[in-house]
Amino acid sequence: MLDIKYIRENPDEVKKRLETKNTIIDIDKLLKLDTDRRNLLGEVEQLKAERNKATQMIAQLKREKKDATEPITATREIGDNIAVLDGKIREIDVDIREIMMSIPNLPHDSVPVGKSEKENVTVKEVGEKRNFGFKVLDHIELTEKLGIMDFKRASRMSGSGFPLYIGKGAQLERALINYMLEFHIKDGYREVIPPIVALPSAMEGTSQLPKLKDDMYYSERDDIYLIPTGEVTLTNIHREEMLDVKELPINYTGYTPCFRREAGSYGKETKGLLRVHQFNKVEMVKFVRPETSYDELEELLKRVEGILGELKIPYRVLELCTGDLSFGAAKCYDIETWSPAEDKYLEASSCSNFEDFQARRMNIRYRPEPKAKPEFIHTLNGSGLATSRLMVSLMEHYQNEDGSITVPEVLRKYTGFDLIN
């Protein structure tokens, strides 16, 4: 959520930056509501002052044993008027909140301006794309040949988009998760196993709601959502808290299954692991001082690159343009891994700085100094990494001519084997 004071003082700037995010919000309507609310609050304060004065007069008249009927009647009328105005303020508060919750975060000044993903900027391409001397199999052909995944049986039990890992396929998936968790833990990240369901308020806190409502699984009976990313529950750990500045930065990592309906997805892009409704992810979340948040964003990116470097999988880093940024992000890097069979890069991670956007929604603050005024923390998150598309790149990149898959060296201590055949 943005700061209403900032919007009030910089309306034209806010409109301009929202337009770069392909968003049009009626900022003038918001400011009119804000003005009306402040005027009503002024009237309420004036009426309360009059009521206090009348109350003092009533007390004095009673002490003097005089008739206090007139000021008592006036006090009741004032109370009725205050109740009416309070009702109007509550109605305006609902309207203001609805608009404020629909306003995305403003892009950072360093973010390239663009309308769509076509205008994202390639920061770097790393690693050598393997030159195969044989016909490359895609990940579905490989898993069927080796019997390590079964999409048909998964579809019969759960519908399309839910993978079934079997035998060494399940072990390889688990190895990836354990490897990535330990990669982060050894550098001081605290491991968390969070809930995989979240209340609507938690979803609002990390800005999945209201924007992404149709893409999430929801239980109406329980009024609860399956999380689309571990970011939701990891970031909500400190909602409504005042953090100790001495503990900053706070770094969490956690593994969770993630669930996305991916409403409207269809066709070739949904086959196998390319776009699934359930996938595994190791997430990183940071709570940091505002002045360090962009350095911390680079640290998140470096961590993802470190994993891919050890796995020796070719990848590229994109800096998203304004028009492709998520609702809550002020700046974001996408990290994509190379798929030989698809002959293209697949998004496997995103690292985002939300600045104080999420913290305002969740009321997460800290004091820069012991007696200083509380300020909102900055939050960041990064996929470190999502396994589904990473598995596609891994299996295809490490395939052999006979259809077997060589296990990357860094994973072998977790799998206990070096070849899937």
Image: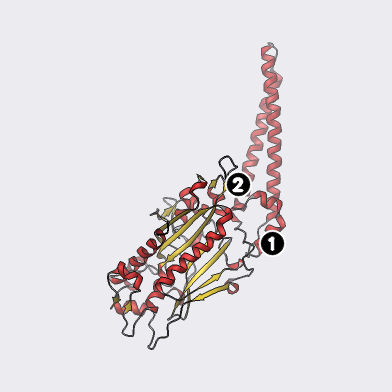
Residue 72 seen: no
Camera-near label (2 vs 1) is 1
Q: Nearer the viewer, residue 276 or 387?
A: 387
Question: Could you say which quadrant of the image residue 367 lies in?
Answer: top right
Question: Could you say which quadrant of the image residue 88 lies in?
Answer: top right
Q: Is residue 386 left or right of residue 414?
A: right
Q: In the image, what residue type sits under mark 2? A: Val
Q: Which residue appears farthest toward the bottom when viewing the image?
A: 133
Q: CA distance from mark 2 to mark 1?
A: 25 Å
The quarter of the rendered structure image containing the C terminus is bottom left
Q: Which residue appears farthest toward the top when viewing the image?
A: 65
Q: How is the image coloured?
A: secondary structure
Mark 1: secondary structure: helix
Residue 143: x %, y % from top left: 33, 76
Residue 417: x %, y % from top left: 28, 72
| Label 2 Cα crowd, 10 Å radius (few <14 / some 14-19 / many 20+) | few
Q: In the image, what residue type sits under mark 1? A: Lys
| Label 1 Cα crowd, 10 Å radius (few <14 / some 14-19 / many 20+) | few
Q: Nearer the viewer, residue 277 or 280?
A: 280
Sequence-wise, which precedes: disc 2 or disc 1? 1
Q: Is residue 164 left or right of residue 223?
A: left
* Residue beneath the point at 68% across and 47% down: 34
**Residue under circle 2?**
94
Residue 12 seen: yes
Q: Is residue 121 left or right of residue 341?
A: right
Residue 16's disc is 1
Vertical position of residue 201 compared to residue 160: above or below: above
